[in-house]
C-alpha cells in the first residue's frame, strides 16, 4: 500500500489526508503552520516535524499549497522545477515554488522512485516539460468545496494530468485502490496536464457564470413578481447536487468564495496573453462586481 505525505494541510490538504486516513492509508501531514499540525496531532493524525520526515517516509506527496492571484506583481521567488513563463506569473507561484523545491531537495537523499502530485490549482503551461529524474510529477486538480470538503472529496471524479507516465500510472493505481475502499463509483480520467488544468479552470468558470447568470435573471424575475429562488431551485443541475451555493451566492453577494474570483481572474489574464478576449467570461466578472457594489 502506498504511503502518503500531505504538503500543505489546510482546507484541501487537511480534507484529503483525513479521508485517506479514514480509509486505512498511512498518511503524514506536513505544514509550515505549526498551529495546523498541532491541531491535527491533537485529533490523532500523524504529523511530521520536518519536510524530510514527511517525504522520506512516504511514496506519494500531495502538494496542496495556496496559489492566490498575483495581481500582476513580479515574482521574487526562484523557479525550481516550475517552468518560467509569462503564464506562470499570473498566479502567485511562491508557495508552490517553495514546496516543490523543498520536496525535490529532500528527494536527492531518497532511494527509489517518488511521485509528486500537485493538487493546487495551476494554469495550463506551468509544469509541462518538468523532468525530476528519479521522481515523477502529476497534476490532480481538486474540486471540493470549503463547506463540505471531505464529503466532496470522496464523491467526485478524479482527473490526473500526466507528464510522467510512471507517476500517472502509480497515481491511477492508488485512486483505483481508494475507489475500491470507498465502495464508490467515481470516474478516474487520465489526460495530459494542460487538459487537466483546463478542466479545473473551466469548471470554476462555469460555476461563476451560473452565479452571474442567476443574479441577472433575478433582477428580471423581481420586475415581473417571480421568486427567483423558485426558478433557480428548479433548473440547477451540475457536478454538485446541492443548490445551497447558488442560494447563498445569488441574491446575496455574488460569487465570493476563495477560489472563483481568483481562478476567473487568472483565466482571464491567461486568455488575454493568448490574444483572446472571452466576452462572456469578462461579462461574468463585470456582473459580479456590480452585484458586490450594490449589496
Ligand atoms: N479551498 C477550496 O475549496 C479549494 C478547492 C479546490 C482547489 N483549491 C486549491 O487548492 C490549493 C490549496 O488551497 P487551500 O484552500 O487548501 O489553501 P489553505 O490556505 O487552506 O491551505 C494551504 C496550506 O499550505 C500551507 N503552506 C504554504 N506553503 C507551504 C509550504 N511551502 N510547505 C508546507 N505547507 C505550506 C499553509 O500554511 C496552509 O496551511 C489552492 O491552489 C486552491 O486554489 C482550493
Image (spheres, rainbow, N blue to C red):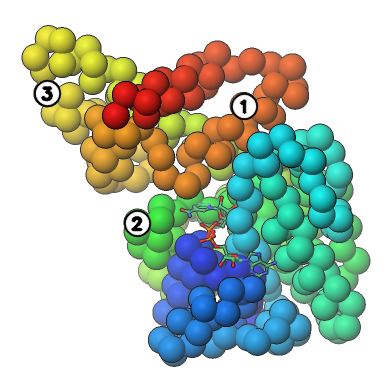
Query: Could you tell me how far apart the alpha carbons at marks 1 and 2 are, in whole angstroms?
Result: 26 Å
Secondary structure of the residue carrying numbered label 1:
helix
Residue 42, above or below 91: below
Q: Residues within 10 Å of mark 3 (few under 14, many from 20)?
A: few
**Image point 81% across, 65% down: which residue?**
101
Of the numbered discs 1 and 2, the one sitting upstream in the chain is: 2
CA gap, disc 2 and disc 3: 26 Å
Q: Residue furthest top?
A: 224
Quadrant the C terminus occupies: top left
Whether residue 236 appears in this view of the structure is no
Q: Residue at x 23, y 20 (%)?
A: 218
Q: Quadrant of residue 107?
A: bottom right
Residue appearing at x 79%, y 70% in the figure: 102
Give the residue number, with chain letter if any, for mark 1: 268
Q: Residue at x 35, y 59 (%)?
A: 148
Residue assigned mark 2: 147
Q: Earlier in the sequence, mark 3 or mark 1?
A: 3
Q: Residue 57 placed where, x, y %?
A: 70, 87
Amino acid at each position: 500500500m502506498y504511503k502518503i505525505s500531505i504538503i500543505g494541510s489546510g482546507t484541501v490538504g487537511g480534507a484529503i489526508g483525513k479521508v485517506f486516513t479514514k480509509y486505512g492509508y498511512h498518511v503524514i501531514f506536513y505544514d509550515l503552520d505549526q498551529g495546523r499540525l498541532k491541531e491535527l496531532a491533537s485529533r490523532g493524525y500523524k504529523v511530521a516535524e520536518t519536510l524530510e520526515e514527511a517525504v522520506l517516509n512516504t511514496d506519494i506527496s500531495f502538494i496542496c499549497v495556496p496559489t492566490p492571484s498575483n495581481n500582476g506583481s513580479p515574482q521574487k521567488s526562484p523557479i525550481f522545477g516550475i517552468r518560467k513563463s509569462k503564464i506562470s506569473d499570473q498566479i502567485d507561484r511562491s508557495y508552490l515554488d517553495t514546496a516543490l523545491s523543498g520536496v525535490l531537495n529532500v528527494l536527492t537523499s531518497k532511494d527509489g522512485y517518488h511521485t509528486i502530485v500537485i493538487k493546487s490549482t495551476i494554469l495550463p503551461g506551468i509544469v509541462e516539460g518538468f523532468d525530476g529524474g528519479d521522481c515523477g510529477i502529476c497534476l490532480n486538480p481538486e474540486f471540493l468545496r470549503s463547506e463540505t470538503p471531505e464529503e466532496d472529496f470522496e464523491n467526485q471524479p478524479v482527473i490526473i494530468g500526466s507528464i510522467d507516465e510512471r507517476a500517472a500510472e502509480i497515481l491511477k493505481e492508488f485512486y483505483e485502490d481508494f475507489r475500491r475502499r470507498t465502495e464508490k463509483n467515481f470516474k478516474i480520467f487520465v489526460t495530459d496536464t494542460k487538459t487537466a488544468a483546463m478542466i479545473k479552470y473551466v469548471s470554476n468558470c462555469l460555476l461563476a457564470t451560473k452565479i452571474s447568470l442567476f443574479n441577472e435573471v433575478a433582477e428580471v424575475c423581481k420586475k415581473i413578481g417571480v421568486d427567483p429562488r423558485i426558478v433557480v431551485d428548479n433548473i440547477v443541475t451540475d457536478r454538485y447536487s446541492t443548490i445551497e451555493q447558488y442560494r447563498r451566492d445569488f441574491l446575496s453577494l455574488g460569487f465570493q468564495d476563495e477560489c472563483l474570483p481568483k481562478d476567473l481572474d487568472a483565466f482571464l489574464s491567461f486568455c488575454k496573453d493568448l490574444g483572446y478576449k472571452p466576452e462572456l467570461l469578462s461579462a461574468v466578472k463585470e456582473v459580479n462586481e456590480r452585484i458586490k457594489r450594490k449589496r
